[in-house]
């Protein structure tokens, strides 16, 4: 199997994206990869991430490829779930406690940390508007997170998200209450639910 075939296969599997780490894992040297990046006219969109010229750059997906441990959360998760009508000005991610998020903060990303026992609670994958799958929290976990973070949010975004969630046919109130108990916001969530339902 030729290097070019392997690289093209990786690009196809990645929806037009290629990570240096994936190519190296397949036995392709960085020198060889660099030559094929030029030959195939791939664009560098981030350190170690390239995209085909015929693919629209997806910022969230690129960020996920560079930082595989992050989970999109808070306002960014609201947007991904359609609970917010505009893309947030700041991207929010959650990382496990101990993860060094300095490089993310330097580029304006809001980094939240969670202990490992709560980090995976409600973790799922959703499609971005470009059709790429990224890690995010489900709607129920996201509602709990924004309730905990309410004082730092735009009140209109907060209220709209709650109303959209309650009006959603995909809502799962039992899961919401289970998460709320684990995240210690059960009483507050119950009050919002009683008012809105």
Image (spheres, rainbow, N blue to C red):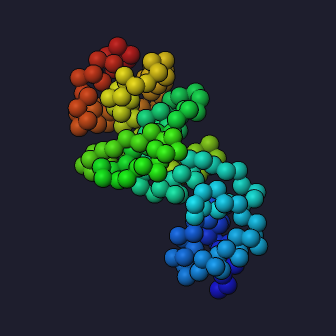
Q: Nearer the viewer, residue 165 or 18?
A: 18
What residue do we see at 55% from left, 32% from top?
A: 88
Residue 35 position, x and y percent, is 71, 76
Residue 147: name its quadrant: top left
In the image, residue 42 above or below residue 125: below
Residue 87 position, x and y percent, is 58, 33
Residue 93 position, x and y percent, is 44, 43
In the image, residue 43 above or below residue 137: below
Q: Nearer the viewer, residue 196 or 68?
A: 68
What residue do we see at 47% from left, 33% from top?
A: 75
Residue 42 lies left or right of residue 103; in this view the side is right
Residue 135 lies left or right of residue 43; in this view the side is left
Res. 184 in view: yes
Q: Which quadrant is home to the C terminus? A: top left
Q: Nearer the viewer, residue 111 or 132?
A: 111
Residue 189: name its quadrant: top left
Looking at the image, the residue that sits furthest to the top is 195
Res. 124 in view: no
Q: Which quadrant is home to the N terminus? A: bottom right
What residue do we see at 49% from left, 45% from top?
A: 106
In the image, residue 17 above or below residue 185: below
What residue do we see at 38% from left, 16% from top?
A: 196
């Amino acid at each position: 199997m030729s290097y070019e075939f392997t690289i093209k296969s990786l690009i196809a599997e990645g929806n037009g994206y290629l990570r240096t780490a994936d190519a190296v894992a397949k036995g392709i040297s960085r020198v060889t990869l660099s030559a094929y990046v030029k030959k195939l006219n791939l664009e560098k969109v981030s350190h170690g991430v390239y995209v085909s010229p015929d693919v629209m750059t997806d910022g969230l997906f690129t960020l996920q490829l560079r930082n595989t441990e992050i989970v999109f959360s808070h306002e960014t998760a609201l947007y991904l779930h359609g609970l917010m009508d505009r893309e947030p000005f700041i991207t929010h991610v959650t990382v496990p406690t101990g993860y060094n998020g300095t490089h993310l903060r330097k580029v304006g990303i809001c980094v939240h940390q969670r202990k490992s026992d709560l980090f995976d609670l409600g973790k799922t994958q959703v499609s971005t508007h470009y059709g790429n799958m990224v890690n995010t929290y489900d709607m129920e976990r996201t509602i709990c997170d924004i309730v905990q973070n309410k004082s730092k949010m735009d009140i209109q975004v907060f209220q709209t998200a709650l109303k959209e969630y309650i009006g959603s046919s995909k809502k799962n109130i039992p899961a919401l209450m289970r998460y709320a108990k684990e995240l210690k916001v059960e009483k507050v969530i119950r009050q919002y639910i009683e008012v809105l339902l």
